[in-house]
Amino acid sequence: MEKSLSAPFDVAQEPGWPRASRNLEINLLLVSRNPTWSHAVHCAARELGGGDILTCDARGALARLAGTASHYSHLLVDRNDAEGLLDELADLANEVATPDTDMFVLGSADARRPHIRAVSTATSRSVIEALMTSPPPRGGPAMDLAELTAALHGAMIETRYQPIIRIADRRPVGLEALARLNHPQRGTMLPDRFVPQIEDAGLAAELTGLVSARAFADLAGPFLAGRDLRMSVNFPLDVLLQPAALDRLEEQRIAAGLSADQIVIELTESRPVDDFPMLRRSLERLRGLGYGAAIDDVGPAVPRLAPLLDLPFTSLKLDKELVQKVGESDEVRTFLAATIVQALAHGLTVVAEGVETDAIWEQMRNLGATEVQGFLAARPLPVAAVPIWWDVWTGQATPPE
């Protein structure tokens, strides 16, 4: 139950307390059945000037963090009530980048999860000190070649999965596999913090191979099997043009026991297409094996879209930043409408990325897009979180308020 709190005094004036603003904004998600922890958290919130506290179980917290219905400034999880979902909750809190959702574990710190801070004692003072402490900065300086190589050869590369939804019936039809780097000192890093460095170092094929192998294993695994979902995997242009990369793709697919029509290869253009005949040969081989192929991040900056549409692609993905401006700019809306018409005329499925509101969903539906992807449905999810999100989205469980 959600409860609003208010406080009659300023903690910053209490002797012995850290300096704080009375108006610290708190919209807190609490996972705990322990009345002592609940009392400590509620008292701390009152003393900090008030806020909203929503208490729920771990599955409910995961479902709420997966979408954008509410933003939570803090996530507090009692490790005794985490239901085996502590890592998944930490992953989703990390995905909330602006503004951050700051996560704490209630109880002792876990050496296996050094980046999740802990509130060790169930007192209002301990909770106040935690809530008032700024989280460590994300990312950090660029990784050097030795770190990049260690990440690729170790167990640091992980995958997240963002659902793709068919507009006509709101059915989940696919997932896009997205890379994350779980660094022992830097924490979990989003792609913009490491993928460009990996590509610049000439290691894009290794990263692509790691992500596709993990994605195929997960698609065939217990969390995703039987849901009739396709899996989209990003391939930089330089990798797609390598015959050895397609050979490895086939080996991974066969090893996972998947059919090629369950997989879509998304062409990400780290550089412009210069050799269209060579790209056509690669795509024809890919399509001949049964894979789907998508043009990714289509916007005005994509050069020579018309020749790309003449190649044997099966889908086109609209750039998310453009999609998010569909209601603000006539120029953007005109471009999107024209692009969708061209894509549909070539028999392509059109996926609108970056759909974060019902209004954008309706605008993209009216323009003729066939599928959507974005925070309105779900953030990128750890694989174990997909079934929980699925139950809520498809109406098999009560959705978050």
Image: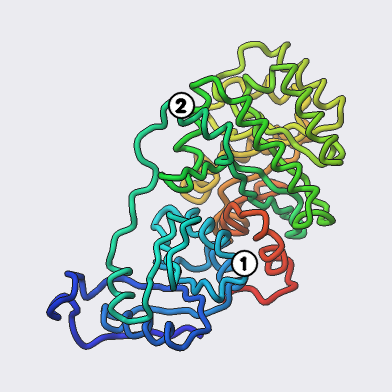
Q: Compare marks 2 and 1 and give the one earlier in the sequence.
A: 1
Q: How many marks?
A: 2
- Horizontally, is 170 left or right of 195 in the view? right
Residue 299 versus residue 293: which sits nearer the camera? Answer: 293
Where is mark 1, residue-wise? 84
Q: Is residue 31 above or below residue 328?
A: below
Q: Is residue 55 visible?
A: yes
Q: Is residue 346 above or below residue 50?
A: above
**Secondary structure type for disc 1:** loop
Mark 2: amino acid: Ala
| Residue 367, percent from left and from top | 65, 47
**Secondary structure type for disc 2:** helix
Mark 1: amino acid: Gly
| Residue 162, percent from left and from top | 63, 50
Quarter of the image where one finds residue 53: bottom left
Where is mark 2, residue-wise? 146
User: Who's the residue at 75% across and 22% down the image?
Assistant: 311
User: Who's the residue at 53% across and 35% down the image?
Assistant: 151
Quarter of the image where one finds residue 238: top right
Check the picture and name the quadrant holding the C terminus. bottom right
- Horizontally, is 136 left or right of 193 in the view? left
Residue 363 versus residue 215: which sits nearer the camera? Answer: 215
| Residue 180, percent from left and from top | 55, 43
